[in-house]
Amino acid sequence: MFSRFMVIVNGLEALGKTYTEVEKVMKILRSLPKKWETKVTAIQEAKDLTKLSLEELIGSLMTYEINLNNHQRVEENKKSIAFMASINDDEEKESESESDEDSMEEECTNEDANMCFMALEEHQDEVKLQL
């Protein structure tokens, strides 16, 4: 973005239109997208824009962009965890005394729960890829 901006400004200067450093800083701040609004506000409140150089502004914006990209990458890498169904010791003792049919039903229920969690995780991954 900065190089494109400088090409435009240099072209205008060649045609006789010059901009002060403050005007260049303000033009860059106004051109940023809405998701950068918090950073723009922070820069405007924390720094004296009449003394802020273009290089200092670009450095600050690049640092923010790197942090923003890292945060997005971390969010994308977070994975949903499928919880395994388990039986505590008391229930396990009771199930040993039950018939084989009851234990088969319980195993099916655990497998069904695990399959549901895995399907949910796959669906969430597909939605993330579509975004």
Image: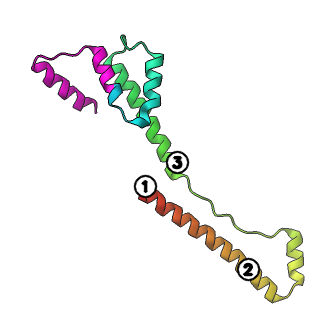
Picture disc at residue 131: 1
Disc 1 and disc 2 in contact, CB within 8 angstroms: no
Q: Which amino acid does label 1 sit on?
A: Leu
Amino acid beneath label 3: Glu
The secondary structure type at the circle numbered 3 is helix
Q: How many marks?
A: 3
Report the span colored magenta. Answer: 1-28
Instruction: Report how far apart the C-alphas of labels 3 and 2 lie in the structure.
Output: 34 Å
Q: Where is residue 10 in the image (x, y as percent from the top left)?
A: 16, 23
Above-or-below relation of 126 to 78: below
Q: Quadrant of residue 118?
A: bottom right
Residue, x 79% and y 89% (percent of image)? Answer: 101
Disc 1 is placed on an element classified as: loop
Whichever of callouts 1 and 3 sits on the residue coming sooner in the sequence is: 3
Residue at left offset 28%, top offset 20% = 24
**Sequence-earlier tag: 1 or 2:** 2
Tag 2, which secondary structure? helix
At x 38%, y 31%, the residue is: 62
Disc 3 target residue: 75
Q: Which of 111 and 93 is in front in this view?
A: 111
The single residue placed furthest to the left in the displayed view is: 15
The location of residue 125, given as percent across then percent down, is 50, 61
Q: In which quarter of the image is residue 37?
A: top left
44 falls in the magenta region:
no
Image disc number at residue 107: 2
C-alpha span from label 1 to label 2 = 37 Å
Residue 57 relative to residue 88: left or right: left
Please name whichever residue, 120 or 98, is drawn nearer the observer in this view of the structure. 120
